[in-house]
């Protein structure tokens, strides 16, 4: 399911997380030393030509109430967590939403965000006001063309033009110094395993063979990000975060969207067959904050994924153990396709993002347990 996800019928490469029991001695499980030297070694050969940045663009943000960060996709599953993490760190946060009077975004206001209206990320309206005076820009709602489109050319156009618009207004603001752009794993997983089945995905990889309209738009969108990072290198630095399926606790009042919808379906009894990547939402938000603050993040890509691949069967088992009474493990056991799932372990090298955070990632089972507990607590199961 999704990019960098696979099933026996669709063996697409996958970027995944630590599904097995955590062993700190294993690659990607948090054993990497977190000195600046180790971070540089982990990120060496990022696969993109990092711009030669000015000293002001290289400098990371410092959390104060006078330092404002704009977050797009503020009402999204990940965007709201990024806004929360920034507020908790001490920043002032503007959350860009399509309709700031909607009851669906009240929880952002309650959290402490200043809501700004950007009705259409592909149009100029609202951008200048939203960006004015901001020192940082977390473009969480990026490279996400409308799912209503099936035409590759149209999806690519939306991804590229949306990126151009956001980066242009960041440059025109004259105050933005750091930009973090949220991307997907579709920009990483390419044909590398055709020649080497044991290849471990990492930030060095670029998707050199996108097959779907969606993945083509993602790849084109990221290419535009780095083109514009070079163009605006005297104004701000850029880093990109390449995210897997994301699970965790819902914020108070937050609707169920994105990967949490998938978890909700499985917890209610749906049996489905796939392999996929995952990460924990608070970890992901922390990477966005680090991307704005850390000097070494300038011009870098970060793959937010664990070392191992995860199967839908394992997710169902973890969900059941966490109290999801709708999971019928007998039905899962009876499904022949599910029983043939063989997660690849390890499947990715996530040491670079661990070095950035300076700590291990939340284990996969705990990601699912937190998500299920949150769904139960909010009466959604």
Image (tube, rainbow, N blue to C red):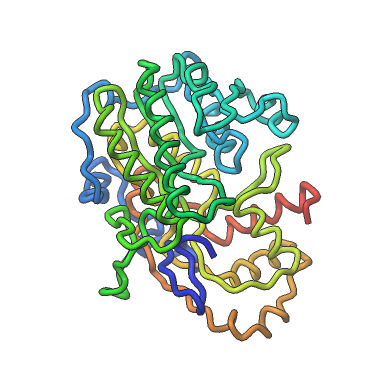
Q: Position of residue 101 (x, y in %)?
A: 71, 24
Which residue is the extreme one toward the left? Answer: 52
Task: From the viewer's perspective, tell me whether residue 262 is left or right of residue 240.
Answer: right
Q: How many marks?
A: 0
Report the residue at 69% width, 40% height from top: 254
The one nearer the camera, 282 or 205, is 205
Residue sitting nearer the eye, 28 or 198? 198
Residue nearest the viewer, comparing 279 with 71: 71
Q: Is residue 199 above or below residue 249?
A: below
In the image: residue 251, left or right of residue 121? right
Whether residue 360 is visible here, answered yes or no, is no
Q: Quadrant of the C terminus?
A: bottom right
Location of the N terminus (image quadrant): bottom right
Point 57% across, 62% down: residue = 365
Residue 290 seen in the current view:
yes
Whole-percent x, y for residue 317 in the image: 65, 70
| Residue 302 horizontal/vertical position (percent) | 36, 47
Q: Residue at coordinates 41% horizontally, 36% vertically from top-left? A: 163
- Residue 60 percent across, percent down from the top left: 34, 27
Above or below: residue 178 compared with residue 372: above
Q: Nearer the viewer, residue 184 or 46?
A: 184
In the figure, 310 relative to 133: above or below? below
Asked if 40 appears above or below 333 in the picture, the reply is above
* Residue found at the far right of this picture: 379
Q: Measuring 60% from the left and 40% from the top, which residue is drawn there?
A: 76
């Amino acid at each position: 399911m999704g990019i960098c996800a696979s099933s026996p019928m669709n063996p697409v490469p996958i970027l995944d997380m630590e599904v097995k029991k955590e062993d700190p001695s294993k690659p990607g499980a948090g054993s990497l030393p977190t000195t600046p030297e180790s971070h540089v070694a982990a990120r060496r050969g990022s696969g993109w030509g990092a711009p030669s940045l000015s000293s002001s663009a290289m400098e990371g943000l410092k959390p104060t109430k006078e330092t404002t960060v704009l977050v797009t996709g503020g009402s999204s599953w990940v965007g709201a967590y990024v806004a929360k993490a920034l507020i908790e760190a001490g920043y002032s946060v503007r959350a860009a939403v399509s309709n700031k009077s909607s009851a669906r975004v009240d929880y952002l206001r309650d959290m402490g965000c200043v809501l700004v209206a950007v009705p259409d990320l592909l149009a100029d309206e609202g951008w200048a006001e939203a960006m004015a005076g901001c020192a940082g820009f977390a473009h969480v709602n990026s490279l996400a063309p409308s799912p209503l489109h099936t035409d590759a050319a149209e999806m690519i156009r939306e991804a590229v033009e949306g990126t151009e618009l956001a980066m242009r207004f960041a440059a025109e603001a004259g105050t933005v110094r750091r930009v973090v752009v949220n991307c997907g794993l579709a920009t990483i997983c390419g044909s590398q395993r055709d020649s080497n089945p044991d290849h471990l995905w990492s930030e060095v990889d670029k998707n050199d063979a996108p097959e779907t309209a969606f993945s083509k738009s993602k790849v084109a969108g990221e290419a535009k990000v780095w083109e514009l990072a070079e163009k605006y290198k005297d104004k701000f630095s850029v880093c990109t975060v390449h995210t897997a399926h994301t699970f965790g606790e819902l914020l108070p009042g937050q609707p169920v969207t994105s990967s949490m919808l998938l978890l909700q379906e499985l917890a209610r009894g749906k049996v489905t067959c796939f392999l996929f990547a995952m990460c924990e939402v608070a970890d992901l938000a922390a990477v966005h904050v680090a991307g704005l603050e850390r000097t070494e993040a300038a011009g870098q890509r970060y793959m937010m994924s664990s070392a191992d691949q995860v199967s839908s069967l394992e997710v169902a088992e973890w969900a059941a153990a966490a109290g999801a009474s709708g999971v019928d493990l007998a039905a899962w056991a009876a499904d022949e396709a599910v029983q043939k799932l063989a997660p690849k372990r390890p499947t990715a090298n996530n040491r670079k993002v661990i070095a950035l955070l300076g700590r291990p990632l939340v284990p996969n089972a705990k990601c699912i347990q937190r998500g299920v507990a949150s769904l139960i607590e909010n009466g959604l199961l």
